[in-house]
Amino acid sequence: MSTKSVVIYDRLSRLFAEEAPDHRIAACKAYAAQRGWKVVHVATDTNVSGASKLEDRPGMREVLAWLPRVDYVLAAKLDRYARSVLEFSRLLDAAKATASVVVTADGMVNPENGSFLANLLASFAEYERDMIKARITASKEHFRSRGNHLGGLAPYGYVSTGRSMTSAGPLTRRPPRSSESAPTGSFITARPSQDSRRN
């Protein structure tokens, strides 16, 4: 019996940039080794949203190119593939067209349970992504309602007082500088008088 080949995929989003992908890739390699599969390529995407299109991800484009030459595509969990039911379904269709199979190292998606469970789990991944976005939006609105500045340059005439991990602090009016309170005439150079020009 010929050895099955597999390409490993991992994705790291901006929201969870502190999570290193090394342990997930190691889990995938261990899963493949237990089944006697040969890992022929490891593709990764960094700072890429799970809702983005497959073709917009450099790592996923590598996976799609490998599909005709491998038996399996492997990721640590389903949400590493995508957090969009549409995009995950597109990956399943692409794999089916090349007779390859999409699986996960956590065992939730395997060759035996088919694509039905995979699509169901993808729906939950999409729901989780939407909940994360809703929490971030609600947090920003909460800080705005308290008069806090969310970061960046403060509006003209204001300074930010106090900072936290989620807010640049409330805004207070900045006292005028000496140059701002000086009379306008002080910035105008007096013309020399006619008497001085004669001298």
Image (cartoon, grey):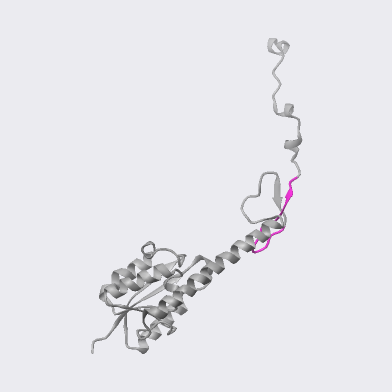
Could you say where residue 36 lies in the image, as x and y percent from the top left?
Answer: 32, 88
Left or right: residue 188 versus residue 43 is right
Magenta residues, dominant SS class? loop
Give me the residue at 73% from left, 37% from top.
Answer: 180
Left or right: residue 103 versus residue 97 is right
In the figure, 32 relative to 151: above or below?
A: below
In the figure, 20 relative to 36: above or below?
A: above
State which quadrant residue 147 falls in.
Answer: bottom right
In the depicted view, which residue is nearer to us: 94 or 73?
A: 94
State which quadrant residue 80 falls in.
Answer: bottom left
Q: Taking the image as drawn, is residue 29 in sight?
A: yes
Outermost residue to the left? 1
Could you say where residue 91 lies in the image, as x and y percent from the top left?
Answer: 35, 71
Region rendered in magenta: 162-174
Left or right: residue 153 versus residue 181 is left
Give me the residue at 69% from left, 9% from top.
Answer: 198
In the figure, 138 relative to 189: above or below?
A: below
In the depicted view, which residue is nearer to us: 88 or 33?
A: 88
Q: In which quarter of the image is the C terminus?
A: top right
